[in-house]
Amino acid sequence: MWKQMMPGLRMTLLLTVLTGLIYPGVVTAICQMVFPSQANGSLVYRGGKVAGSSLIGQSFTRPEYFRPRPSAAGSDGYDASASGGSNLGPTSQKLIDRVKASAEKARVEEKITADLPADMLTASASGLDPHVSPASAQLQAPRVAVARGASTAAILSLVEQFTEGRDLGFLGEPRVNVLMLNLELDRKFPLTK
Amino acid sequence: MTGNGLFQILIYLVMIVALAKPMGVFMGRVFAGERTFLHPLLRPLERLCYALAGVREEAEQRWTQYAGSVLSFSFFSFLFVYALQRLQGMLPLNPAAFSTHRAPANATAMTPDLAFNTAVSFVTNTNWQSYVGETTLSYLVQMAALTVQNFASAAAGVAIAIALIRGFARQQASSIGNFWVDLTRAVVYIFLPLSLAGALFLCSQGVIQNLAPYTQATTLEGKTQVIAQGPVASQEAIKMIGTNGGGFFNANSAHPFENPTPLTNFVQMLMIFLIPAGLTYTFGRMVGDTRQGWALLAAMSVLFLCGVLIVYAAEQSGNPNLSKIGVLSAASDTQPGGNMEGKEVRFGIAATALFATITTAASCGAVIGMHDSFTPIGGMVPLFNMQSGEVIFGGTGAGLYGMLLFAILAVFIAGLMVGRTPEYLGKKIEAKEVKMAMLALIATSSVILLFTGASSVISFAKDSHWNGSYGAATGNLNNGGPHGFAEILYAYSSGAGNNGSAFAGISANTPWYNLTIGLSMLVGRFLIIIPMLAAAGSLAAKKKLAVTTGTLPTHGPLFVTLLIGTVIIVGALTFFPALSLSPIVEHFLMLEGRLF
């Protein structure tokens, strides 16, 4: 019995060292040398301080910024140490109420009456979605333009510039990175206060 | 559905079928002990493993010894993972100070039942997430416990599949290979090289790989955002290649640090099916008739494609309750439309539907969208994929031995219809094999249904040990009505199917759910493995019969149809009543506008 069991113990120890310490150690060493920016979270800096990550969404509430999608991460959204979705199902009263409230708010703020893009009113899976759809960004452009004293056309052309197409032409969906767009807004159309 | 969405699905399937043969040939050579292009580099490592583990490479095992070795390995693995989790507060590589008095405010306690659940979950290749990675586990646990089991449980699955194939391939033999040798070869030649390449690719695209503490960022609006870090890429690669699916982060592959772009997403999807698809070819090659492998792959592909198209159609048509309040559900060039709750913009509807079908067909369990927020029909396909035994490609190894179980049943049913002793690959399928296949099926189906039933009615006192402040076991649900029931059904289907994905609204981190889901995982793993190894032992001892005009050919469309029918009928008969109480009735209630 014991003779049968022994290789089990030894193999567990061996694999722990090989695949649990050596393998991740080697990967860490190579990645830190070859892809230091990506390996450390694709962080973006402003004024020498970390302003976020180009891959991670953050919350924007002021009128001069483009807004991200609703987020269920953490207690008030975009908590990058507590990812997650709402997990509300299609027949959930809570979901319908939440979407209705966001839709009404968006219609007032963006001054539109038309149907709204789905991504703008729904919470993402990670709660950290850095993107909105191009349609969601475009309909926010007039508000941002007013808040910044810029022309809508100028803001729309910036949205156009920050619209990423599908990967390799067919994978995924076109999208706009909200943080990167807002950083560029601050650079190009700074608020004069 | 958009043309581009369908194109993504088509290209994916074509690539998987194209990769099956080269991968299958390579794996066949590895397990036969033949030289491959990796041997000059890795043969010394393989020999070192045997020397250190005290294994004789040429020794063969009977099925009982093989099964004993699997159990011994799993037992020690379980002890290790459990101990590392419980001791994490005293061990290094814990920058967030989990399980200490300096732990962050949102940290989750590492209780004995949570450690049990997570240890069982990773040892059985389930990777159900009762834990929340970024608020519970130290980097040491993520690496030395979870990453290790991602390799170990996946390699063990492949080893068992190879042993079962030997049962069909050998005749009048008393042994079916050596578990330790199969395990070592799977890790050294297959999983390690693929994971290393995969991890480096993923990191180059933005998946993080560091041991740094969490980053404090000051957002453009001046708030503080704490960004979780960690050695993700090394775990992400094996999580996919080993069809494990346990996320480094709570949001799993939806988290941009696990899966930053549509391209990494496509590669991750290829990683999931690579080995399960390849093994069908390995199977054909080892039994001396590659058409037998293609037949299994064909059955899997048909079931898979049907599943994807159903999920895609359901998710793209969206939620009528949202359309009514002014949400666009049709896709256009500038927005994805459909049911975007719980989905990421970069992936959209098509890629998320594709991923959800892959991950549940393959017993992977990683997610890029929250299945709990899928439409009823979109969520039913993942449920069915798990309940039908995870055989549509299935987990590494587990998918193949699960599909062979159905093949045994299919020839048995065909044999009953024409009144002949069934045969498969020249081996008579007799009482022993059919009994073993039925034992495996009944054991896994019954834990799903019994525990789902129990959790639907069982009631605990408020603040009891068993279920904390939730009271009744239905108090843990995030949704009401039939969708709430579906959350319970999904949890046990995922456990017994060793899948690991969830209708994640359910708060399953209580002793009641941690223990019962843990038990489902153990039954779903070992009560399939042991009967299948017993069948392998009995098959290996038999003579091969000559093919006659009365033999049912098992490589043609007739058999493929029969096999698909068996999977669907067995799944449908067992789970149709439970499914009608959840997604099916929910679908009609949704159309009627009923909310809960």
Image (cartoon, rainbow, N blue to C red):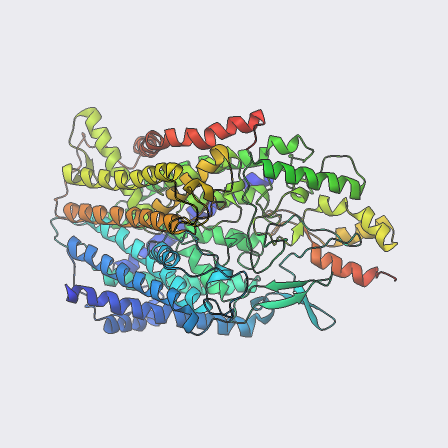
- Residue B235 drawn at (x, y percent): 45, 62
- Residue A56 drawn at (x, y percent): 62, 58
Name the residue located 26 percent from the left edge and 70 percent from the top edge.
A10
Q: Is residue B99 above or below residue B18?
A: below
Q: Quadrant of the C terminus of chain B?
A: top right
- Pick the front one: B387 or A109: A109
Quarter of the rendering containing residue B429: top left
In the image, taking residue B101 as reference, residue B348 lies left or right, namely right
Q: Is residue B2 visible?
A: no
In the image, taking residue B424 as reference, residue A140 lies left or right, namely right
Q: Is residue B577 visible?
A: yes
- Pick the front one: A31 or B278: A31
- Residue B118 drawn at (x, y percent): 38, 57
In the image, taking residue B320 as reference, residue B356 lies left or right, namely left
- Pick the front one: B382 or B578: B578
In the image, taking residue B398 as reference, residue B358 lies left or right, namely right
- Residue B255 drawn at (x, y percent): 55, 55
Quarter of the rendering containing residue A16: bottom left
Name the residue located 23 percent from the left edge and 30 percent from the top edge.
B413
Number of numbered labels in the structure image: 0
Q: Quadrant of the N terminus of chain B?
A: top right
Name the residue located 30 percent from the left edge and 60 percent from the top edge.
B30
Name the residue located 84 percent from the left edge and 49 percent from the top edge.
A153
